Image (cartoon, grey):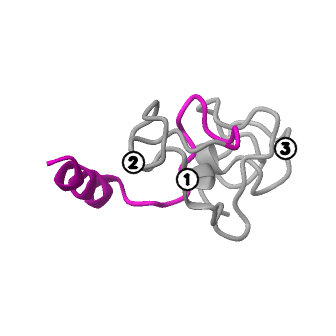
Amino acid sequence: MRLSLLLVALALFGSGCDDSCAVALDGSCDELIPGGTGLCAVGTDTTDCRGDGPPEGCSDTCSTARDTQCDDGGEGALYDICELGSDCTDCGSR
């Protein structure tokens, strides 16, 4: 049953560039998957759980990353306080 739920969740959420969990990027897999802590929904701690990190040109190294506002100065950004491509969760892949 648990495996079935995991497969459904993976199908729904995928494994894209998403580190939206509040405890993402802490070096520990926090998703509700085997080996994870279960603190996050599947697909929301991608970097820690899959080890592949975000796609090239996409990171959350901006000091204000994951604050729901795009801060990298690119198209559609609200602010220009970070390097282009350093606020992936809020701005998307650049």
Q: Residues within 10 Å of mark 1 (few under 14, many from 20)?
A: many
Spot occupied by residue 22 in the image (x, y as percentages of width and height) = 57, 28
Q: How many numbered badges does the structure rendering display? A: 3
Magenta span includes 8: yes
In this rendering, is residue 52 above or below 74? below
Q: Quadrant of the C terminus?
A: bottom right
Q: Residue at x 48, y 43 (%)?
A: 36
Instruction: Identify the magenta region.
Output: 1-27
Which callout, 3 or 2, points at the residue further toward the start of the chain?
A: 2
Q: Residue at x 74, y 40 (%)?
A: 71
- Residue 73's tag is none
* Distance of label 1 from label 3 (alpha carbons): 26 Å
The residue under label 3 is which amino acid type?
Answer: Cys
Residue at the spot of label 2: 33
The answer to whether the residues at label 1 and label 2 have Cβ atoms under 8 Å apart is yes
Which callout, 1 or 3, points at the residue further toward the start of the chain?
A: 1
> Could you say whether the residue bearing mark 1 is in a helix, strand or loop?
helix
Of badges 3 and 2, nearer the viewer stands 2
Which callout, 1 or 2, points at the residue further toward the start of the chain?
A: 2
The residue under label 2 is which amino acid type?
Answer: Ile
The residue under label 1 is which amino acid type?
Answer: Cys
* Distance of label 1 from label 2 (alpha carbons): 9 Å
- Residue 82's tag is 3
| Residue 50 sits in quarter | bottom right
| Residue at the far left in the pictured view | 1
Spot occupied by residue 47 in the image (x, y as percentages of width and height) = 62, 54
Residue at the spot of label 1: 49
| Residue at the far bottom in the pictured view | 56
* Distance of label 3 from label 2 (alpha carbons): 33 Å
- Left or right of 9: which side holds 16? right
